[in-house]
Image: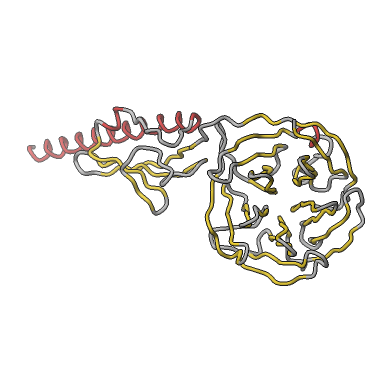
Amino acid sequence: MKNRFIVALFALMLMMSCNKDKEILNTLNDYNLEMESRGYHFGEALKLPAGVTENAQRITISFGDKETSSLVVDPKFFTLGDNAVTFNITKKDGEVLNHDATINVFAKNPEAKLTYEVVQEYPHDPRNFVQGFQLEGNTVYESDGQRGTSKILKYTLGSTTPIASTAQPADVFSEGSAIVGNKIYQLTWQNKKGFVYDKNTLKLLGEFPYPNVMGEGWGLTYDGKNLIASDGTKNLYFLDAADPSKMVRYIAVAGNKEAYDQLNELEYHQGFIYANVWQKPIILKINPANGEVAGKFDFTEIAKLHTTNDDDVLNGIAFKGNNMLVTGKNWPKIYEVTIK
């Protein structure tokens, strides 16, 4: 009888402990869900509920291969945008509870709402699935995608007749491109490599592997020192222009109230990176020092004239002086806009 009582008492204590653990984790989950939409800024502290802290001997946050006991949003640990983390709660009895969560970190300063006015329209070949788009002088350099029809070409702005064109192998899906001196660098989507061309003839000069950190190739631009690449995530990678297989650094991108991923076609102009977001009619103006979105263009009125499905979307940014050129995949037009 005594043994039965001890077993029953142990079972009761175990049940109470399990219920307490659920209560702690549910409290932490409610807090994290609330803060996921609200977000944090760098330097802010995580103010965990008393129902969590009062039952914890120690709390740490692990993120990838890193772990910290500081409950402050430190840029040495977190990046802008979404951070997939695990809370590790060591209870006073030594038991450890784990809880997965997302910590969103937003830019401190609100992004400017940038406006524009269309001042000129130019023809564009609607067969071209635009992935990379640059203007030098009056010559457009364009990288076009799709397997079997991928190519690099150049033509005079206002014309659709190529001056030169080089096709890629059938298994290649071309992506972003950038001009560096007398060369053009071009990414591929899933081939894990890029191509290098002579700018004048578009003759293939060589190829290079991606840094391991890049899963895919999306957009590409050049800031005068480094190539800057996107891979469809929230990250922008600064690559050594002399050896693009080497990453110099990277930044994550976020606005004041929104995290962005699927960063696609890129353009660098007067100290800022401009990026469109895949399948959205917006272009972001990004601070290359820290990834904060300084401004945002809404090109809905232009995009809706040409976007009928998931493919024919806004995707093409270049600058003609201080005016911006925008186009899209399979669009029949290039628009020149003045920024107000």
129 up-or-down from 116: above or below? below
Q: Nearer the viewer, residue 32 or 284?
A: 284
Horizontal side of residue 194 vs 71, given as left or right: right
- Front residue of this view, candidates 139 and 279: 139
The chosen color scheme is secondary structure
Is residue 286 left or right of 171 when viewed as pictured? left
**Residue 293 lies in quadrant:** top right
x and y, in percent, of residue 212 in the image: 54, 62
Q: Quadrant of the N terminus?
A: top left
Is residue 102 left or right of 49 when viewed as pictured?
Answer: right
Q: Position of residue 220 (x, y in %)?
A: 67, 54
Q: Position of residue 197 (x, y in %)?
A: 75, 67
Quadrant placement of the C terminus: top right
Residue farthest toward the left in the current orientation of the protein: 2
Q: Image point 73% across, 64% down: which residue?
A: 183
User: At 38% across and 51% down in the image, what residue appears?
Assistant: 66
Instruction: State which quadrant residue 60 falls in.
Output: top left
Question: In this view of the protein, which residue sits in the foreground, 11 or 83?
Answer: 83
Q: In the rendered view, would you say 238 is above or below 208?
A: above
Count the marks: how many? Answer: 0
Q: Nearer the viewer, residue 111 or 69?
A: 111
Task: From this view, report whether residue 173 is shown above or below residue 297.
Answer: below
What residue is rendered at 28% in x and 32% in y? Answer: 53
Residue 325 falls in which quadrant of the image? top right
- Identity of the residue drawn at 29% across and 27% down: 50
Q: Position of residue 258 (x, y in %)?
A: 57, 34
Residue 2 vertical position relative to residue 68 in the rendered view, above or below: above
